[in-house]
Image (spheres, rainbow, N blue to C red):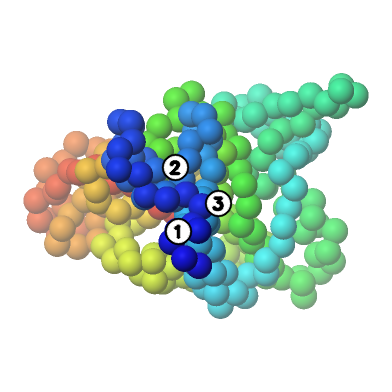
Amino acid sequence: MLYSKLFGKTKKEVKEYDSISHKLLTQAGFIDQVASGIFEYLPLGKRVLAKIENIIKEEMNAIDAQEVLMPLLHPKNLWEKTDRWNSVDVLFKVKSQWSNEYALAPTHEETVTPLAKKFINSYKDLPLALYHITTKFRDEKRAKSGILRGREFGMKDLYSFHTDKKDLENYYQKVIDAYLKIFKRCGLDDIKITEASGGSFTKKFSHEFNVITPAGEVDLIYCSNCSFAQNEEIAKEKNNCPKCGHKLEKNRAIEIGNIF
């Protein structure tokens, strides 16, 4: 396609935003903001998304995960069954003209579990891993940093089912390795894997994948000499690395993936 015919051309000047990425992506013609935390991806931005999605799909398929597509509109009873209708603070709730209540999906545990239950009949059907790439909705109190923290955004999520804890732990490591391959193929090499709290979506810990950048939203404490890294939310006061004794560093980072 000729540049003269491209929809969404480069702009010489754009207004100031709270993040440099928001400004540059707008100026380069990749995105356009509809409202706070809500964006349209223009042809150039959509091409980038498609390339990233292809990389993700290849690496997910390589660990025997199967792609599905689940709905964005979830009946209220599914979230009541898991006791999360009132406990997830970022849950968008909508009511139809027929008075039925729904959640706009921020995650898909509530639909993937009953789906898997319909098809898992014995241990021979396990392990099973299902993933999809789709839109998510989260009612963020303050959407900021451009597309890094939106109210509507695209995400890949993977759900796995296992015969026992050992099988789960083995697959967990395979997923970590797959994520690292994805990030490397996307040009991100220095990844910090940190242990953090599970937040609204799990009561246990989670592992986050972070990249160091001044534009980040996460305060990260890490060792530049070994693999030790912790999110400051759970990090204890320490000056030296508990693994190698090297002096710890503190910096801002962007969370680019999460497993729990």
Say which residue label 2 marks: 147
Is residue 5 found left or right of 233 in the rendered image? right
Residue type at mark 3 is Met
Q: 140 or 208, which is in the foreground?
A: 140
The answer to which image quadrant residue 127 occupies is: bottom right
Say which residue label 1 marks: 4
Give the x, y percent position of residue 82. Answer: 71, 37
The answer to which image quadrant residue 232 occupies is: top left
The answer to whether residue 216 is seen in the rendering is: no
- Residue at x 63% of width, y 52% of height: 134
Q: CA distance from mark 3 to mark 1?
A: 32 Å
Q: For the residue labelled by badge 3, is the local secondary structure a helix, a strand or a loop?
A: strand
Is residue 251 found left or right of 218 in the rendered image? left
Q: Assess disc 1: are there few (<14), some (14-19) or many (≥20) residues with their C-alpha within 10 Å of its C-alpha.
A: few
As drawn, 246 above or below 72: below
- Residue at x 17% of width, y 43% of height: 250
Give the x, y percent position of residue 219. Answer: 27, 39
Q: 214 or 176, which is in the foreground?
A: 214
Give the x, y percent position of residue 74. Answer: 76, 39
Q: Assess disc 3: are there few (<14), some (14-19) or many (≥20) residues with their C-alpha within 10 Å of its C-alpha.
A: some
Q: Earlier in the sequence, mark 3 or mark 1?
A: 1
Say which residue label 3 marks: 155
Q: For the residue labelled by badge 1, is the local secondary structure a helix, a strand or a loop?
A: helix
The answer to which image quadrant residue 89 occupies is: top right
Q: Nearer the viewer, mark 3 or mark 1?
A: 1
